[in-house]
Image: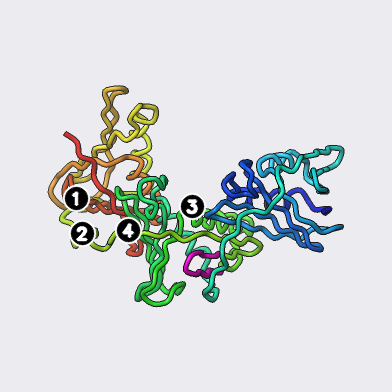
Amino acid sequence: MRFRTERDGLLEALSTASRAASGRGSGGTSTPSLQLSLHGNHLVVTGADPDLVIEVRSSVSGDSDGVVLVPARLLVDIVRSFEPGAVVVTSDDDEVRVTSGRAEFTVRIPSVGEVSRLSAAESEGITLPAALFADGLRQVVRAALADDTRAPQLTGVLMVATDTGLRLVATDSYRLAFRDLSGVSALSPSSEVLVPARALAEIQRLVGTRTDASKDAEPPPLVFHHGELDAVFDLGEVQLTTRLLRGPFPDYERLLPASYPSSFTAAREDLAAALRRVRLMVRDTKDATTPVRVSFGEGGAELTVLTAETGRASERVDGAFAGEDLTVAFNPTYLLDGIEAIRSDSVTIDVIDSSKPATVRAADEDDYRYLLMPVRVS
């Protein structure tokens, strides 16, 4: 195999595909690997593990076709080290040579084989509004469980068809987020799929990267299709395939309170900034989950963090409060996640009491909810 291309384009393709590369199932080697496949002037860079595959297509100047497996991190670092300009990649049975200017690297091929593959999705592709879908993911993915050892199904985002469009739901059992995307039809009526949050976080990042690069222009179309086992997202030159999750997802609608007796509304950035400051008291402590006590009352809320190890921090935030005065304790990081997910300038926190779920929402929008369980304190 031999081809020539520009450094920046090659680096983007390698970096994107490497986000899926792992030592699990990549050509039988424990080293995270990428597969480079050249046919004519078309290069496909593939990174994979048993649950996620990212393929990036790129146009190059090809001299001879071939397929080779290369160490992912090393190749990315080598190409990144080059100055902008032409890069030539050549491979034989034992090694890959990468040259640019006067620099030349010879890398031994870690093993012979191909990266993992997932089955092809069966449904017809549906084009999603990429920017809107990515914005919903930005708000929802943060609530998914990060560790799959406790409840693997909670590491996913539930995509469910509603009467008005598509709903995205995620929960780690301590908090729950959902976003309604009105008018978006991605699934047949009343159907649902559970997509790993890791894969959707990559979709969010890819859409954001392409939106930033195009300077306010629309990103490429995002096409979604799925089968019984896998889902596929196509975004321009990138195709992401992920294995769907199985297992019972919580009946989240049962968790939604019918009403709230108290609510507090404040400027979103004022509240977030105050929370970031008082959270500094627990940033470097042994117990980073020390709660922030939020005392709601007329004219505002008092945020207080108290630890035996570092001391005390408090700050008052002005706002409008309706209801009986009360104090509720929250995990400060979880609360900040919910506040930062809001798009509008004002945020509302609806509360019942110190033991029932509170809701963080935009003061002037109704399509996003972030439920958060209080922390019990003595």
Are circles 3 and 2 on residues that touch, CB within 8 Å?
A: no
In the rendered view, tell whether residue 114 sits above or below residue 164: above
Q: Residue at x 33, y 60 (%)?
A: 248
- For marks 4 and 1, give the one nearer the viewer: 1
Please give the label number shown on residue 198: 3
Q: Label 2 is placed on what type of residue?
A: Pro
C-alpha distance separating marks 2 and 1 = 9 Å
Q: Position of residue 37 (x, y in %)?
A: 74, 57
- In primary-sequence order, the first of circles 3 and 4 is 3
Label 1: which residue? 356
Q: Position of residue 300 (x, y in %)?
A: 23, 44
Secondary structure beneath dot 3 equals helix
Secondary structure beneath dot 2 equals loop
C-alpha distance separating marks 1 and 3 = 29 Å
Please give the label number shown on residue 257: 2
Are circles 2 and 4 on residues that touch, CB within 8 Å?
A: no
Q: Could you say which is closer to the camera, residue 231 or residue 142?
A: 231
- In primary-sequence order, the first of circles 2 and 4 is 2
**Residue 136: quadrant of the picture:** bottom left
- In primary-sequence order, the first of circles 4 and 1 is 1
- In primary-sequence order, the first of circles 1 and 3 is 3
Which residues lie in the magenta part?
223-232
Answer with left or right where residue 352 lies relative to residue 137: left
**Residue 335: quadrant of the picture:** top left
Label 4: which residue? 369
